[in-house]
Image (tube, coloured by chain):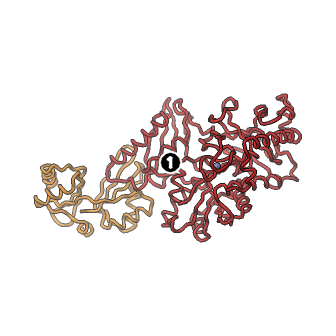
Amino acid sequence: MYWNRKAETLKPGELRRLQGKRLKKVTKYVYRNSGFYKKKFRDLGLKPGDIRGVEDLGRLPFTRKSDLRDNYPYGLFCTGLESIVRVHASSGTTGKPTVVGYTGNDIELWTEVMARSIMATGSTRKDVLHVAYGYGLFTGGLGLHYGGERVGCTVIPASGGNTARHLLLMQDLGSTVLACTPSYAVYLAEYAEKEGIDPREDLRLRVGVFGAEPWSEPMRKRIEDALDLKAYDIYGLSEIVGPGVAQECEEQCGAHIWSDHFLPEIVDPETGEQLGEGEEGELVFTTLTKDGIPLLRYRTGDRTILEYDKCSCGRYHPRMIKVRGRVDDMLIIRGVNVFPSQIEHVLLRIPEVGSHYLLVVEREGPLDVLTVKVEVTEDVISDRVRDLMKLEENIKSSISQALGIKVDVELVEPFTLERSKGKAVRLKDLRE
Amino acid sequence: MIKQLSVFLENEPGRLVKVTRILEDAGIDIRALTVAETADFGILRIIVDDPDKAHGILKENNVAVASDSVLGVEVDDKPGGLRVIAEILAEGEVNIEYVYAFATRSRGKAFIVLRVDDRERAVEVLNSSNIRLVEQNEVSGV
Ligand SMILES: [Zn+2]
């Protein structure tokens, strides 16, 4: 379903012309309004007029997260605070948060792409949208909230927190759409089962809008089975706008980037060189229509592949083929590149394995050792040790086959790995 | 037939204590227990007076538990008691996967728990040798 049929079904030629026009405009705008970009342009010997269309995108300077941090809090804003109506911030793992600001127009633009995103999942004003993302400085809650209201959904601003209360609200209020992180969806399902709540009988969920962390195709299957809904990937980051930068449609074949507002490219994370269609690399965005804090060629740190062919849903907006993980999530184990998402992919295809796992990397002497901790489910418990040893062996060899490295596997008791209500922690790197 | 509970345990200090305490707090009496282990984990096998209640309580406490049936056999509580059973089964070409014993209050008798590869055949050869099989209700009332 479309929210804005015209914008969502632009043909490739029309889309590229519109992007070119907007790119020229935003280039001039930042040059005029941002000391930061003016200096970058000067250093490169670049004039705003040099950018004549999308083909010149590669000439523009990159922007990095560190630029936002170095110019904390308002240094990259292109407008005075009198025009800023809202601020969001994402917590850095170290030091100061990253602060972003929105003008009234920016909130309008964000609401528009969120409305498109919600309707792309087949949700309409008839739906009851349960927002279990946190409300606050984090963009998740308010992003879904405004988009849901714009579509006309009945929005339940449940926010983060108490799982029993979420289930009670969803049961009593008849929620049909659930928005949260995929790992929290898994936790909700587990909790419901323990409490004897059967999603098929007691809940009316039919759509899940899950994002803010990468998740694999097998994880999607599990969530869909456990909660009896169709699960869709939503992608976004606060630096660009928040959730709603990209959204999966009902075909479930990768999130469509709303590229009339956010112009994507894929670059080599090492060299910064633009990569061709179908190549995997780091996702980079240029915001085409933002006023408060427009960013040129922002390095997201997310690795993906873009597909540009027409989707069966009628949209040409390019699709992100599942984020494979963060560029900085990549582990180098004994010289081999490993993404945690690859391991999840293998693990969740083994039916006996629970949905929770933890990867621990340690150094033993000169060697990196990767241990995969997996929770057993009660279905695999047997009185015979050898049945479980066989399962361990099976996990080990499946991962080794897929990744080309040897790993250790450790079965652990159910509910002993940490559950998260926000982003899941699935990796502990104890090296150095 | 006797009901046996199998519990998954990580090889960490305190895990066995945790499980036995859960049962103790629920007023469940453990009649016999044995642990089979590898470097990383172990399987605790237990015989209790009320297996259904024990199963439920353990599950509620997020313990990974499964239940199944094993053979219970009565033997004389004296040297050679177990050997007699082993010989009967060997002659009947039944393999024993594991065995453990527990004392009873009936004087001079002990119960043993047997897991074999062919249960039907085991019952047949034990019966024909006049070995008494023990049922769950006897365990519950030990
Ligand atoms: Zn589509």
Residue A430, placed above or below residue A145? above
The quadrant the C terminus of chain A occupies is: top right
Residue A332, placed above or below residue A319? above
| Residue at 47% in and 34% down | A405
Where residue A134 appears, x then y in whole percent? 67, 58
Crowd tier of the residue under label 1, counting other residues whose Cα lies within 10 Å: few below 14, some 14–19, many 20 or above: many
- Give the letter of the orange chain: B
| Residue farthest bottom in this picture | A172
Where residue A302 appears, x then y in whole percent? 65, 41
Q: Is residue B33 visible?
A: yes
- Give the letter of the red chain: A
Q: Nearer the viewer, residue A336 or A162?
A: A336
| A259 left or right of A369 in image | right
Q: Nearer the viewer, residue A94 or A250?
A: A250
Where residue A205 appears, x then y in whole percent? 58, 63
Q: Which residue is mark 1?
A: A357
Q: Nearer the viewer, residue A162 or A146?
A: A146
| A418 left or right of A280 in image | left
Chain letter of disc 1 in the image: A
| Residue at 55% in and 66% down | A203
